[in-house]
Image: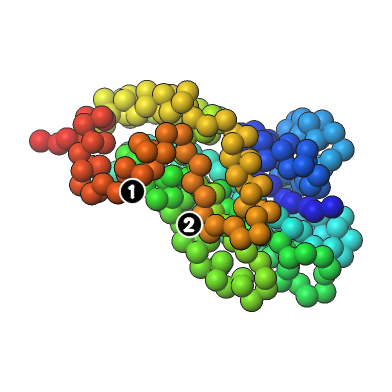
């Protein structure tokens, strides 16, 4: 039986990946931060996997989890690591607290770094283990390629994961470990609800107030039109199992509008479109 660790498995994409892969015969380890979430995930997996309590922001906890999972694998390898845990805390870059920006980067980017370092041996870097070599799937976003106003911290973190993935994919060829990026567009998950609940009202007195209001309306619309998490879970399964996987997958709703046009049109033209939508045209 193949085994996989999924970080951030309590809700959204992580939870969908856990349930989907368990149903497809994988032994799933899903990271969560709260005991209540662990109990809910264990109930959903129904013996086909288990929750593991740790926070990707805690290096020692990630290392303990790797040792714990290694013991449970009994000398075998882990065939998949899905770096999904993340937070989204929007705000204008000139005003957003430094600590808040640092938190987003720490969880979204350094969290992936910590798990790769802790679990690299189980995936294939430790020659003493047995079984097929593993793959790393890093969940980024369209934000890993495009920037959107008032999400600079999130965008920077996802750009960082994209660059990290590109480099380690080539480094880990030495160990036979592949690295694949899955960068979805809008997905129906709680991540932006949690982020916008992060008291955007504190910016109501700023010159960005009107634009931020339009942003929250835009995020709500994207959520309504977003992909179901299972669509991303199926893409992740492809990344883990395809004989010749792509280096990057981009499941997005309405690919023409949300992927191809932003990719192909001049950036200044996209600037003008975004400015018009959010009232950022300047004087």
- In the rendered image, residue 26, in percent from the top left (x then y), is placed at 79, 47
- In the rendered image, residue 204, in percent from the top left (x then y), is placed at 31, 25
Say which residue appears at 52% left-offset and 50% top-offset.
249
Say which residue appears at 73% left-offset and 65% top-offset.
133
Q: State which tag comes first along the sequence, 2 or 1.
A: 2
Disc 1 target residue: 263
Say which residue appears at 72% left-offset and 50% top-offset.
5
Numbered badge on residue 28: none
Say which residue appears at 35% left-offset and 36% top-offset.
257
- In the rendered image, residue 148, in percent from the top left (x then y), is placed at 34, 41
> Is any atom of residue 55 visible in this view?
no
Q: Look at the picture and state if 255 lies above or below 277.
A: below
Quadrant including the C terminus? top left
Q: Look at the picture and state if 112 lies above or below 177.
A: above
Give the colour scheme shown: rainbow
Viewer-side residue, 88 vs 226? 226
Given the current orientation, which residue lies at the most extreme right position?
Answer: 74
Viewer-side residue, 228 vs 209? 228
**Residue 57 appears left or right of 206:** right
Query: Around disc 1, counting alpha carbons within 10 Å, would you say few (fewer than 14), some (14 to 19), or many (20 or more)?
Result: some
Viewer-side residue, 211 vs 80? 80
Given the current orientation, which residue lies at the most extreme left position?
Answer: 283
> Is any atom of residue 84 visible in this view?
yes
- In the rendered image, residue 63, in percent from the top left (x then y), is placed at 72, 59
Query: Around disc 2, counting alpha carbons within 10 Å, would you say few (fewer than 14), some (14 to 19), or many (20 or more)?
Result: many
**Residue 228 appears left or right of 31:** left
Disc 2 target residue: 162
User: Which quarter of the picture shows residue 37?
Assistant: top right
| Foreground: disc 2 or disc 1 | 1
Q: Secondary structure at mark 1?
A: helix
Q: Secondary structure at mark 2?
A: helix
Disc tally is: 2
């Amino acid at each position: 039986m193949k085994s996989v660790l999924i970080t951030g498995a309590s809700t959204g994409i992580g939870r969908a990946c856990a349930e989907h892969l368990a149903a497809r015969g994988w032994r799933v380890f899903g990271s969560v931060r709260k005991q209540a979430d662990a109990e809910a995930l264990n109930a959903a997996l129904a013996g086909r996997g288990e929750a593991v309590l740790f926070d990707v922001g805690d290096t020692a906890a990630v290392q303990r989890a790797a040792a714990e999972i290694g013991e449970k694998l009994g000398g075998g390898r882990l065939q998949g690591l899905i770096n999904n845990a993340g937070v989204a805390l929007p705000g204008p870059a000139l005003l957003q607290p430094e600590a808040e920006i640092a938190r987003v980067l720490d969880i979204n980017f350094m969290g992936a770094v910590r798990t790769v370092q802790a679990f690299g041996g189980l995936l294939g870097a430790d020659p003493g283990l047995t079984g097929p070599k593993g793959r790393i799937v890093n969940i980024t976003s369209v934000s890993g390629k495009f920037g959107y106003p008032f999400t600079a911290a999130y965008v920077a973190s996802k750009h960082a994961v994209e660059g990290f993935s590109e480099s380690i994919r080539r480094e880990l060829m030495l160990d036979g470990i592949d690295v694949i990026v899955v960068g979805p567009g809008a997905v129906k998950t709680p991540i932006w609800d949690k982020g916008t609940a992060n008291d955007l009202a504190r910016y109501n007195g700023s010159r960005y107030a009107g634009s931020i209001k339009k942003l929250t309306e835009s995020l709500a619309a994207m959520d309504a039109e977003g992909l179901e998490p299972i669509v991303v879970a199926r893409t992740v399964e492809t990344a883990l199992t395809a004989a010749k996987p792509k280096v990057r997958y981009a499941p997005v709703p309405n690919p023409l509008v949300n992927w191809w046009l932003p990719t192909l049109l001049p950036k200044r033209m996209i600037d003008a479109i975004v400015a018009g939508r959010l009232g950022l045209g300047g004087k």
